[in-house]
Amino acid sequence: MKQQLVYLFRFFVLTVAIFMAAKWWFMIAHGDNTFQGADLLLVAWHGLSLDISTALYFLILPVVMTIAASVVPLPSWLFRAYYLLVAMLLALAFIADMSLYSFWRFKLDASCLQYLETPAEAFASVSIGYLVARVVAWALLSWGLYATYVRLAKLPPMKVARWWHGGVHLLLAAVMVVGIRGGLGESTTNIGQVYFSQNQFLNHAAVNPVFSFLSSLGKSGDYLVSYDYFTDEECRSLTNAIFTTESVAPDTLLNTAKPNIVIIIMESCGGQFTDMGGHPEITPRLNALRREGIDFTQCYANSWRTDKAVVSILSGYPAFPITSVMKVPEKSRKLPSIAASLQDAGYSTSFFYGGDINFTNMRSYVMGSGYERLCWRADFSLQEQQSAQWGVRDDLMFNALLSDIRQEKSEPWMKTLLTLSSHEPWDVPTHDLDDEVYNAFHYLDACVGHFIDELRQMPQWRNTVVILLPDHGYRYQGIDERTRLYNHIPMVWVGGAVKEARQMERICNQSDLAATLLGQLGIAHHDFTFSRDILSQKETQQVAWHTYNNGVSVFTPTEFMAYDLDVNQIVAAEGASATELLPLAKGLLQLTSHDLIAK
């Protein structure tokens, strides 16, 4: 019995040690993040509880096999096969976690599985060499971990059990359950318990990627989460003044009641890449258009992912920390939309996207939201489809949009283009700036400028409004969810239908576009429950909000607060009263999540 327990102890300690080593490897691999030598020990110490819990999960089968081996001798290859399986799973988790963190800046979780439904789109951000290198690394690491288990964990002894061994096994099982659970208290093991620093990278490094993945299973994009913090009455008192569904004597921005409408959703083009973020050289054409048209200077993104942001923009519906409404057709089809409202008002509608329209269930949402016609990757030649990793590059898509506008026989019409070139791997055909990220946005800006120049020469320009806004910002050069600038986005209206150049300084979300635009057209928008006409005299609340991977941010003219739901703590605050925004953030999560579940 003693030898069996020693074997199990060796296996357990070895697994914990592997988890610790993986943390240090993760930190060193992401050396662009700031940390000190002592942080290596702090990360290992604070992450130990999750490592222990996860290692105990992997210990369950060896315990069962050891018990069985004490009754009926088991072949040694059975244990070796388990070592190989564990080694392959751990290697996959470590490689995937280290690779995805560079793009997502959060730990490995089950959300990565949803992208495997469309693997071509999922891997479009990286090169073949990048993938091959990681497959090779996975194979080598799997073999190395397997050899380590065989050499150091060894094999259990095959001895006949005695009557009292059963009691020892029951006691061991009880200890393991308590260890996996994280103790006997009400709180169970969770990711937040390892957070210890104001440096989020250190907190992320302390999180066990296997535990993070397992704990998030079932909570992918189509998982509905109910946020419950207050009574219904308390929630209403916090949020009632935020959303109004009326346009009361709105300011008039347009010189026609039924303009043609073009909505350009610019991939990742947050304010950080414009003169808003101190980079006028990256997007000079967009900056000029801000001065020429209606510039919404205090607009904020609702989300950090395209699938969530598109719903916010086109349906005026908020984004959620986990749930992607686009991926829940039974919910998304019940949402109002700009396209459907315009279609009822006599508009023809079309949607342009150079990628795979089936990615993240986009086709279902777009077709269900009132778009009569789609133009996507499959509508182009094979050469054009392969012009960029994600599909048809932006200059070709803008030209297709221009061609479509030229062929319009009647008005009014509404067209939406979702761009894609300003996305990893930044494979654009121009090389005007040395920084590949900045260069990609400079290319997008040139495409936008060319489109406006060409449209300006058409007779349709006189009766058209072009609305430019991004889906979200991009984590780069220290800009992330803990900074106000990450969510601060440009929104510009230009075109012959625009009455005059204006600056609109009221705080708003991209989800407010629906009510604001429909209010300008005199179209009812009471069914857009969470979209505000920011030009209405009734709109008095100066607040915007944003959700990210299990977090929420709130903005006012003078305050900004970001709250991490994993650790239940404020991770960023600007302004004297910033922390007082937390009840409002929770109230908004509760109000909107309950609305979604009820649909």
Image (cartoon, rainbow, N blue to C red):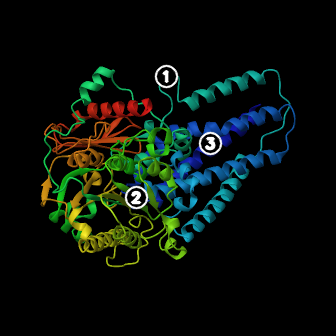
Q: Do the residues labelled 2 and 1 touch (CB within 8 Å)?
A: no
**Which of disc 1 and disc 3 is earlier in sequence?**
3
For numbered disc 2, what is the local secondary structure? strand
Looking at the figure, which quarter contains the N terminus? top right
Q: What residue type is labelled 3?
A: Val
Judge whether residue 324 can be spotted in this image: no
**In the image: residue 449, left or right of residue 356:** left
Q: Mark 3, mark 2: which one is toward the viewer?
A: 2
Q: Do the residues labelled 3 and 1 touch (CB within 8 Å)?
A: no
Depth check, front residue: 476 or 348: 348
Judge whether residue 414 can be spotted in this image: yes
Residue 434, picture quadrant: bottom left
Q: Which amino acid does label 2 sit on?
A: Ser
Looking at the figure, which quarter contains the C terminus? top left
Q: Mark 1 points at which residue?
A: 185
Q: Name the residue under label 2.
A: 350
Tell me where residue 379 appears, x and y as whole percent.
Answer: 50, 67
Check disc 1: other Cα within 10 Å, few if <14, some if 14-19, many if 20+: few
For numbered disc 1, what is the local secondary structure? loop
Q: Which amino acid does label 1 sit on?
A: Gly
Q: Mark 3 points at which residue?
A: 13
Q: Is 148 rendered above or below residue 539?
A: below
Tell me where residue 294 appears, x and y as whole percent.
Answer: 17, 58
**In the image: residue 423, left or right of residue 467:** right
Tell me where residue 122 appears, x and y as whole percent.
Answer: 53, 58
Q: Is 35 rendered above or below residue 445?
A: above
